[in-house]
Amino acid sequence: MKQIAKKLLLIMLAVMMTLGCPAVFAEEESLETAYFDMVLANVLSNYKFEVDTAAMASSFAHKLLEKHPEMLEDLIEIVGDQMDQYSGYFTPEELVDFANLFNAAYVGIGVTVQRMIGSVGVVSVMPGSSAEEAGILAGDRFIKVDGQDVTGLSVNEIVPLIQGEEGTTVQVTMLRDGKEIPLTVTRRAINGNTVGYSELETGVGYLQIASFNGSTPGGIAEADAYFKKSGIKKLIIDLRNNPGGELISVVNSISYFVPRGKNVISIEYANESRNTTLRSIGDVTGKPYYNKIVVLVNGETASGGELFAGNIRDHGLGTIVGVTTLGKGTVQEFMHLPEIGELKFGSMKLTTAEYVLPGGEHINGKGIKPDHWVPNRYVRLDTSNMEELDLLRDYKEGDHGPGVLAIKQRFNAVGYFVGEVNDQYDQELTITVRQYQRDAGLSPTGVMDYETLIRFRSDVEAVRVEIDQQFNKALALVKAK
């Protein structure tokens, strides 16, 4: 076999030298793969007439499938890999994960939780959720889940116990006003909210849109009603890190701001007969309600996020602050693949169109340049006012002193829950240390030993605190007279 391989290699080298081609091989390539690549490259570069490479690829695939029909899904995946970065093949499982990602969906009971002193507590209960139906209230604390004591667990430890397969039930014991209340709750699919809003100060509102899914327009409607009821006419819309989402959701969301009938998006398809223009369907008919709007964007604002920002700018409704957006001005559609006998396939996600902003701008590959270019700054976490971190001893539950305070101060600063920031190594700190050790890939002992302290110090030193200059600029602009 080795002799045959050597002869083949010599033949390849001879052909390459004859045709004037460099002998370059990738280390991971097999001899057969390299040989085929060489032949194909030389045929295509030296053949006098045009070659139908699509027909050639189809012929290759047919020949391969005759001998290896089990490779059908692999070949479909290869087709997707040759398209742009937003296209590709999704298995049925990957398709579910993708849908959940954009819809912020999960199977659970419909509560928001956080670690509180002594247990994990309920911050809010989603209206209409199974948790609400079962009688869980904000402020309740989880004591047991399916009979397991969970008072010493972190949020990350308790959430997987509550979540599970849709339609199954979970037995929870809640602590309320000193009484333990056993409840049975059915797990359901939950579509998470992508909209947040608040009043920053008198007359100034803040609207954050994390992505666009089926619930987004409803969330914006709720925010819009709140702002109008509160008399808020100055608005900051935060689209930073918004990856986009469902096109119809974007159009319906924009319609709360763009006057009815105005062009929102023009879509140019590969099949030109499908070209279309979508218009605002909102209730805004005369002068816009909001007299000042500033939109925040960054390099991760993409697709629907860019479309939303572009509409606010192009219709003269507000200005854009931040840095140039990602530049994903395309539309993708899912092409569902039919079953063949017992074989079940997923879907091909395919870029089928490019969109144009109302002002006529194509942003794909370019992004939207903000009216006010403002990058954020990142600085080291300031620990100068904290206690010194002592690395020369271990700390465990029951210990106290300045060294414990130093640990709590740093955990609190980087976002871990420690309860009261004092010099007592209590149960809450043990839980937090154990969670940090899991996150860091260390043994979750709950003890701040030398290995944990060294890693912790390194991680704290690597933390960069974001100075949100973009938000500060947006606030200054909406408040300016």
Image (cartoon, rainbow, N blue to C red):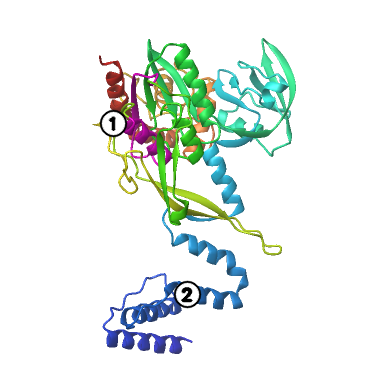
Position of residue 312 measured from the top left corner of the image (x, y, whole percent): 36, 30
State which region is magenta.
288-315
Q: Which mark is residue 5?
A: none
The percent position of residue 157, horizontal first and vertical second, equals 59, 32
Taking 333 as reference, is 9 above or below it?
Answer: below
Residue 146, by quadrant, is top right
Indicate the secondary structure of the residue bearing disc 2: helix
Left or right position of 67 against 302: right
Q: Depth check: 399 or 31 in front? A: 31
Q: Residue at x 38, y 30 (%)?
A: 391
Please name the residue that numbered disc 2 is placed on.
Answer: 55
Q: Is residue 308 above or below residue 474?
A: below
Location of mark 1 (residue): 376
Mark closest to the chain's N terminus, 2 or 1:
2
CA separation, marks 2 and 1?
Answer: 51 Å
Residues at discs 2 and 1 in contact (Cβ within 8 Å): no
Q: Residue flagged by tag 2: what amino acid is it? A: Ala
Residue 235 visible in the picture: yes
Is 480 one of the magenta-colored residues? no
